[in-house]
């Protein structure tokens, strides 16, 4: 049974756009679909139709992975430019953000210009990510009940679940004791872009690790416990039989046990250098190092022989 909505997301959506519509002197339209509505500007009708279609596909996938369905209708806003996206979202968004979710309003705002850059094929990934925030927000009473690492980690895993091995950056960071701790990723993201990227990668890979380590359906079982009122840490303990701190340490150890050299080779190859070239370079450098070591040994033996050690 769906609880009655105390706040009309559609009304909020129209209020948000009133000022910008007057300023831009454009007529916005709303396209209604099953469980969702999309507000768009002239010239975005095809985009809006695609968004509704992708929304339906995203919901099916999320129901399977998370065991959650929307409790209320979701409103989706399409903006045309990054400037308009920043105006609608309050002007504080980073330039790399393509969409934002507002779970308390069951609202998603998408930067249409970003989707044009990353491609329509990635629209379902963007929708799945933001819809996960909406779905998780609908099962908790307060925002602080959702640690940032869990909220973002599950959203990334649900929209892109197939990462069988950790990212190379995480292996190198773990081996250099440079990983961020989950306690630092509870209420907010770090300030620097590099640490933000690391925070997202850690959150994603930790959730993936739980699913791989404890079996398919682990994340869904944790969410079911949360839906029953359990905090994240308690839900993890009930499902995995391990406390959160121990799980994080086990995951960190699993990263440290991976080959740092292999991770470095893969990381370098991602910058456009073919993998075979990187491997060949590593082999050459290794052989050069071998020759240098051998030459130093021969020189030492010759010196020792001259000094009468033999």
Image (cartoon, grey):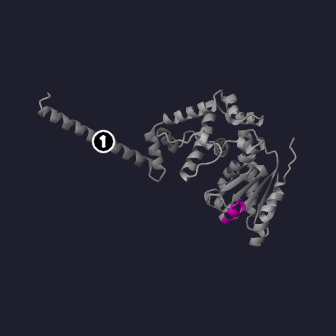
Q: Any magenta on residue 86?
A: yes
- Residue drawn 30% across and 43% down? 288
Q: Position of residue 121 (x, y in %)?
A: 65, 54
Q: Quadrant of the C terminus?
A: top left
Decide if residue 225 is in sight here: yes
- Residue drawn 77% across and 37% down? 227
Relative depth, front residue between 54 and 229: 229
Residue ID for mark 1: 289
| Mark 1 residue crowding within 10 angstroms, few (<14) / some (14–19) / many (20+) | few
- Residue drawn 12% across and 32% down? 307
Q: Any magenta on residue 168?
A: no
Q: Helix or strand or loop: what does disc 1 sit on?
A: helix
Chain part drawn in magenta: 83-90
Q: Is residue 209 left or right of residue 11?
A: left
Q: Is residue 285 left or right of residue 195?
A: left
Magenta residues: mostly which secondary structure? helix
Decide if residue 204 is in sight here: no
Q: Quadrant of residue 236?
A: top right
Q: Is residue 286 left or right of residue 151?
A: left
Q: Position of residue 12 (x, y in %)?
A: 81, 58
Relative depth, front residue between 190 and 239: 190
Q: Quadrant of residue 24?
A: bottom right
Relative depth, front residue between 89 and 75: 89
């Amino acid at each position: 049974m769906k609880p009655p909505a105390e706040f009309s997301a559609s009304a909020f959506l129209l209020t948000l756009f009133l000022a910008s519509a007057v300023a831009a002197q454009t007529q916005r339209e709303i396209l209604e679909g099953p469980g969702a509505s999309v507000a768009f500007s002239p010239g975005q009708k095809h985009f809006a139709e695609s968004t509704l279609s992708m929304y339906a596909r995203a919901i099916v996938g999320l129901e399977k992975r998370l065991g959650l369905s929307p409790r209320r209708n979701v409103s989706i806003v399409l903006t045309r430019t990054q400037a308009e996206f920043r105006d609608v979202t309050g002007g504080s968004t980073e330039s790399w953000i393509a969409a934002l979710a507002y779970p308390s309003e069951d609202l998603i705002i998408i930067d249409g210009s970003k989707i044009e850059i990353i491609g329509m094929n990635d629209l379902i990934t963007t929708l799945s990510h933001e819809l996960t925030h909406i779905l998780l927000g609908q099962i908790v009473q307060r925002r602080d009940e959702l640690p940032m690492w869990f909220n973002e980690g599950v959203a990334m895993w649900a929209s892109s679940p197939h990462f069988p091995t950790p990212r190379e950056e995480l292996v190198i960071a773990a081996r250099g004791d440079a990983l961020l701790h989950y306690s630092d990723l509870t209420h907010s993201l770090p300030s620097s872009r590099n640490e933000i990227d690391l925070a997202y990668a850690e959150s994603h890979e930790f959730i993936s690790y739980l699913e791989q380590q404890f079996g398919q359906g682990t994340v869904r079982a944790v969410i079911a416990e949360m839906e029953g009122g359990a905090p994240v840490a308690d839900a993890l303990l009930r499902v995995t039989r391990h406390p959160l701190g121990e799980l994080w340490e086990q995951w960190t150890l699993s990263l440290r046990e991976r080959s740092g050299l292999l991770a470095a080779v893969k990381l370098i190859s991602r910058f456009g250098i073919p993998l075979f070239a990187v491997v060949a370079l590593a082999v050459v450098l290794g052989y050069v190092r071998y020759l240098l070591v051998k030459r130093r040994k021969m020189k030492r033996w010759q010196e020792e022989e001259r000094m009468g050690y033999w």
